[in-house]
Amino acid sequence: MSDVRVAETTDVEPRGSCEARLTALRERAARVQHDVNNPLAALLAEAQLLDLDPTLGDEHRLAVRRMIELCRRVVGSVRRLDEIRDSEGG
């Protein structure tokens, strides 16, 4: 009978430990989203305003548009963190 209890305890402990790690991962994902989104949104807004500047030369405008595209790629990557944060049990 004691063998069964050991097996049950061993089976439950890793599951609880796994859930604690998943909870910590979800919390970390939410913090990363917040920490990245705020400055990224400001950077993207500034680049978009700069793209509207009629005095901007063609070479610089092309560079600004590359920056805008790269910002949007990072936004997409950060949004995928929702999959972790919103996963089952979160």
Image (spheres, rainbow, N blue to C red):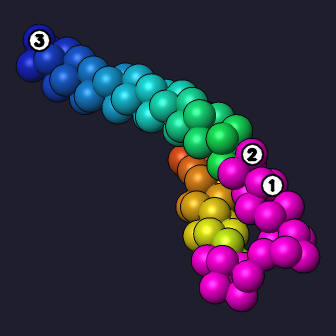
Amino acid on which the number 2 mark rests in the picture: Ala
Q: Residue at x 14, y 17 (%)?
A: 6
Answer with left or right where residue 29 lies relative to residue 14.
Answer: right
**Residue 5's image quarter?**
top left
Q: CA distance from mark 3 to mark 1?
A: 64 Å
Answer with left or right where residue 68 lies relative to residue 73.
Answer: right
Question: Which numbered tag is attached to residue 42?
Answer: 2
63 in relation to 19, above or below? below
Check if mark 2's residue and mark 1's residue have beta carbons within 8 Å: yes
7 in relation to 76, above or below? above
Viewer can see residue 88 = no
Viewer can see residue 72 = yes
Q: CA distance from mark 2 to mark 3?
A: 61 Å
Q: CA distance from mark 2 to mark 1?
A: 5 Å
Q: Residue at x 58, y 61 (%)?
A: 74
- If you read the primary sequence from the N terminus, does the residue marked by circle 3 or circle 1 appear first? 3
Question: Which numbered tag is attached to residue 45?
Answer: 1
Check if mark 3's residue and mark 1's residue have beta carbons within 8 Å: no
- In the rendered image, residue 55 lying in the magenta stretch gets the answer yes
Answer with left or right where residue 26 lies relative to residue 16.
Answer: right
Question: Which numbered tag is attached to residue 2?
Answer: 3
Amino acid on which the number 1 mark rests in the picture: Ala
- Tell us which disc is closer to us: 3 or 1: 1
Amino acid on which the number 3 mark rests in the picture: Ser
The quadrant the C terminus occupies is top right
76 in relation to 10, above or below? below
Image spot of residue 18 (x, y percent): 35, 32
- If you read the primary sequence from the N terminus, does the residue marked by circle 2 or circle 3 appear first? 3
Q: Residue at x 77, y 54 (%)?
A: 46
Image spot of residue 25 (x, y percent): 45, 34
Q: Which residues are magenta?
A: 41-63
7 in relation to 72, above or below? above
